[in-house]
């Protein structure tokens, strides 16, 4: 019975949107997505064996760009701190810039946007050049951050807000337009 009322409500909201005319959409800006990630996702990964070869990478600051580098991709930039241990050498503290790019994907059941087909675009260190050994050690930790980033939503619609609830209950299209992620009901 509850499902029947939910279906009726969704249909009524959908017809109301049609009657009000045109396309119903919800725009997610770069700052919306950046703020959502900063508030909801904590990323820290470790790889290796401590006191032998070990790296711990933690993301400090995230910035999102939508459709700027490639029209269908979202770029996630992060300022990252890394602690690297290699045998008996002194620990190295590194300030890294990491950039991932990904294709957004919408999950209708949860109203969440995920990043799929992640690609590591950039891995740079500010103060010193990375030796091949350190870079080889850091890459798995950075890849695990990318994997973790693809497992967490980068944005979630709020079912308590009418417009977002309408979008969430339908089968929307997901497009990138004017450096925004647009979730729209109708073409």
Image (tube, helix red, strand yellow):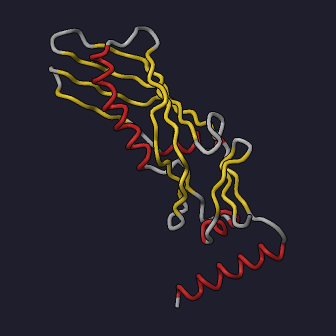
How many marks do you count on the picture? 0
- Residue under the point 21% across and 29% down: 48
The foreground one among 41 and 53 is 53
The foreground one among 94 and 1 is 94
The foreground one among 43 and 125 is 125
Residue 42 locus on image (x, y percent): 42, 39
Against 88, residue 26 (above or below) is below
Residue 139 locus on image (x, y percent): 34, 28
The answer to whether 96 appears left or right of 18 in the picture is left
Quadrant housing residue 125: top left
Residue farthest to the bottom, as pictured: 1
The answer to whether 42 appears left or right of 181 in the picture is left
Quadrant housing residue 83: top left
Quadrant housing residue 87: top left
Residue 127 locus on image (x, y percent): 44, 8
Against 89, residue 9 (above or below) is below
Q: Quadrant of the C terminus?
A: bottom right
The answer to whether 35 appears left or right of 99 in the picture is right
Residue 105 locus on image (x, y percent): 53, 54
- Residue under the point 45% across and 33% down: 120
Against 63, residue 23 (above or below) is below
């Amino acid at each position: 019975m509850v499902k029947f009322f939910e279906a009726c409500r969704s249909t009524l909201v959908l017809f109301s949107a049609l009657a009000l005319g045109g396309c119903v959409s919800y725009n997610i800006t770069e700052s919306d997505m950046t703020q959502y990630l900063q508030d909801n996702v904590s990323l820290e990964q470790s790889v290796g064996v401590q006191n032998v070869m070990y790296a711990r990478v933690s993301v400090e600051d995230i910035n999102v760009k939508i459709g700027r580098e490639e029209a269908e991709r979202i770029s996630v930039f992060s300022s990252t701190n890394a602690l690297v241990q290699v045998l008996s050498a002194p620990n190295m503290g590194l300030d890294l810039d990491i950039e991932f790019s990904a294709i957004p994907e919408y999950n209708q059941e949860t109203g969440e946007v995920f990043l799929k087909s992640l690609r590591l675009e950039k891995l740079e260190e500010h103060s010193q050049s990375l030796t091949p050994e350190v870079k080889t050690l850091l890459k798995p930790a950075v890849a695990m951050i990318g994997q973790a980033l693809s497992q967490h939503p980068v944005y979630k619609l709020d079912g308590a807000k009418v417009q977002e609830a309408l979008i969430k209950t339908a089968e929307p299209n997901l497009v990138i337009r004017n450096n925004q992620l647009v979730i729209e009901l109708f073409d």
